[in-house]
Image: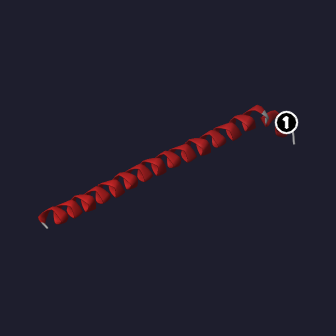
Amino acid sequence: MGQCSSTTKMRRKRKRENKGGCRESTERSRGCLMMVKEKRSRFYIARRCILMLLCWHKYANS
């Protein structure tokens, strides 16, 4: 009887550890996605600014 309860406790402990690991990897991937989105938006802004600087002479005469 003692073995069964200790085995059950070990299984519960493993499940908790797995959930924590899963949560950890989810947080890590979420952080990576946020970083990618930020880099993408910064690149978009930089691209628009460069385009505006290159084409400013077209609209300067208007």
Residue in the image at 15% along x and 61% along y:
3
Residue in the image at 74% along x and 36% along y:
51
Between 54 and 2, the one nearer to me in the picture: 2
Residue in the image at 39% along x and 55% along y:
23
The extreme front residue here reads 1
Residue labelled with disc 1: 58
Say few, some or many: other residues with alpha carbon within 10 Å of mark 1 (under 14 / 14 to 19 / 20 or more): few
Q: Is residue 3 above or below residue 35?
A: below
**Which of the 4 quarters of the picture holds residue 15?**
bottom left
Between 33 and 11, the one nearer to me in the picture: 11
Is 36 positioned to the left or the right of 60 in the image? left
Residue 59 image position (x, y, % from top left): 83, 40
Residue in the image at 19% along x and 64% along y:
4
Is 24 positioned to the left or the right of 10 in the image? right
- Quadrant housing the C terminus: top right
Residue 16 image position (x, y, % from top left): 30, 59
Name the amino acid, label 1.
Lys
